[in-house]
Image: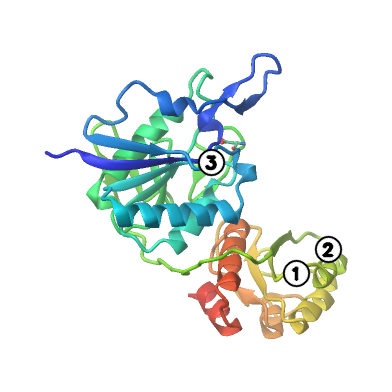
Amino acid sequence: MSKKQILIIHTGGTISMKVDQQSGTVKPADTNPLLSVDQPLDESAVIASVEPFHLPSPSITPKEMLELKILIDQTLQKQHFDGVVITHGTDTLEETAYFLDMALETETPVIVTGAMRSSDQIGTDGLSNLMSAVRTAGCSEARGKGVLVVLNDEIHAADNVTKTHTSSLSTFQSPQYGPIGIVTKRNVHFHQQPIRRQKIPVTSVNKRVALIKAYAGMDSHLLLLLKDLPYDGVVIEALGQGNLPPAVVPAIKELIHQNIPIVLVSRCFNGIVQDVYGYEGGGKHLKELGVIFSNGLNGQKARIKLLMALASNFAPEQIKKVFEQ
Ligand code: ASP
């Protein structure tokens, strides 16, 4: 059997960090320890590695996400790879994975992985996550499933997965839906096929989208500031099924009047927002005012999607459609 050709793109994160003995903090190592791993990651794979940047993931912005998309497109055009693995810090990993899921057209598996413990901590998960990611990337069943996130031997779809725990190795979960597959000692098993794949052919990320969380007693002040700031859209993590305190309604009306799209998600991490409640600030009222309801994405991913749609110059109706699909 011929060996699988796998491209690993290193971007930084804890997976490539070390503990600084003096301060006791976890920091980027001078050189990425993953680049000098001397044991084979997968006997049946030939690995090529590149490191376009070496950043903690709070420093990753949509600019780096677009850079990754371009790098993957250009590399796959020039050379055959059976799969691509991206190593990434876990804090914003889900945003990069979701961006790439919508931006990339390729059927080649693209797997994003990371680690919760640095390379020199006891019980480090970096190498085992990387191995599982490489094996998933080389698995023909992973083709056409979109960008996948592999950590802790679970395979998650980019649109559902989220970081749920600050430090646990099993931090990545897909609330409500669960993982779409698992990696075992011998095999890579898929038990679900993502059916809701969307594409936004983004070529720039030159838009600003705010993400604001609703709370009991919220008023209009903060949201109203947005109309005088260089923001092109806003995502609100609303209450429950998609409701806001009545004191927020004046700001909603004003932003919509200023043609600033408002996308609503729920601050609950299960379920979808709907226009169920008919009171002042209830979902039905907000929908009538022109608020766009998203279909189950969390706030940070809805923000990425709105940014991509705005940067691709989608008309208001198109923006509504990509969120409601
Ligand atoms: N703070 C780190 C980062 O996202 C966390 C990690 O990689 O696990 O870069």
Can you name the residue that lies furthest to the right here? 221
Q: Which mark is residue 218?
A: 2
Q: Which mark is residue 244?
A: 1
Mark 1, secondary structure of its residue: loop
Query: Label 1 crowding class (10 Å Cα cut-off): few <14, some 14-19, many 20+?
Result: many
> Does residue 176 show up?
no
| Residue 63 percent across, percent down from the top left | 58, 55
Is 140 rendered above or below residue 104? above
* Residue found 35% across the figure and 36% down from its top: 132
Query: Label 2 crowding class (10 Å Cα cut-off): few <14, some 14-19, many 20+?
Result: some
- Decide which of tag 2 and tag 1 comes sooner along the chain: 2
Q: Which mark is residue 53?
A: 3
> Does residue 245 show up?
yes
Q: Are marks 2 and 1 in contact (CB under 8 Å)?
A: yes
| Residue 192 percent across, percent down from the top left | 32, 55
Ligand 1 falls in quadrant = top right
